[in-house]
Image (cartoon, rainbow, N blue to C red):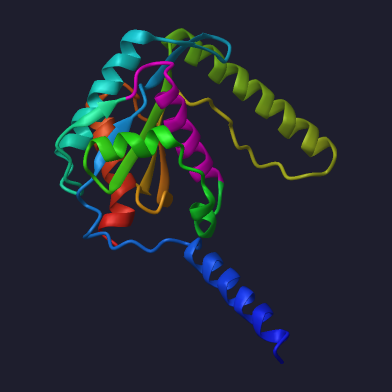
Amino acid sequence: MKRLLPFLVLLALALSSCASAGRLVVDPGQARRVAVLTAPSRVGVISRGNMEVLDDSLGNAATEFLAQALSISYLIDADTVVQAERFSALEDSVHQVVNVAQAVRKRKLSQVRVPDNIVEFARSQGERYLLLATHGGFTRTRENYRKETVKGVGVTMASVALSVLLGGPSAVYISTPYREASTLSVALVDVEERQVFYARTVFTELPPGDYGTLVHQVRTALTDFYDR
């Protein structure tokens, strides 16, 4: 029994450490006061095929609109929205945390690594909770949208014809490309615990450089956590 006691003590310590690193439960009311850090928006224009070319003017406008949408949101309380500099290590870290948080299942959010520079930024703002946001999208030119739609209809009809010849279903489902799209992703971080406790991505077929689009996406992304 004496030999067993040290083992039991070590086992209890291991289990307690695992529990502390488990899924983090945060009260939405306590986490309304946040620091906000966004990466610059990446917005492109498609004029040939499906090749997207980044447009700085559209990206800059979307970046400003996102900051405004976050600033006026009744769901969070933030003095300022800070934008990570383009191509900086801080911007890369924002994308890293947000992208990984979207990829893992909810119960594994606590496993997302939060880089030191993200933690240091939040502490410099004097806040325990941090909201990270990334945004991107595209818009097609009118001519490109027309051509790609015609191409999609042709491919769809050919597929249906082949299906009918092979004895398959004859229903027609025409595939058309997105004319425009906007994707907003957010992640909420508890800086003291260095854990992500909420993540959400909102996709919509709306112009990515439009202020109304960003307001809608911000509200949708945050409502799931703060108004639950």
Residue 40 horizontal side relative to residue 95, left or right: left
Decide if residue 146 is on the left or right side of residue 159. Answer: left
The answer to whether residue 216 is visible is no
Q: Position of residue 45 (x, y in %)?
A: 44, 12
Residue pictured at 28% horizontal, 40% vertical = 123
Q: Position of residue 217 (x, y in %)?
A: 31, 39
Q: Position of residue 90 (x, y in %)?
A: 40, 26
Which region is colored magenta? 84-103
Q: Is residue 95 above or below residue 101?
A: above
Query: What secondary structure predominates along the stretch shown in magenta?
Result: helix
| Residue farthest to the front, as pictured | 2
**Is residue 13 magenta-colored?**
no
Residue drawn where x is 24% and y is 22% of the image: 64
Q: Quadrant of the C terminus?
A: bottom left
Which quadrant would the N terminus be assigned to in this image?
Answer: bottom right
Nearer to the camera, 4 or 11: 4
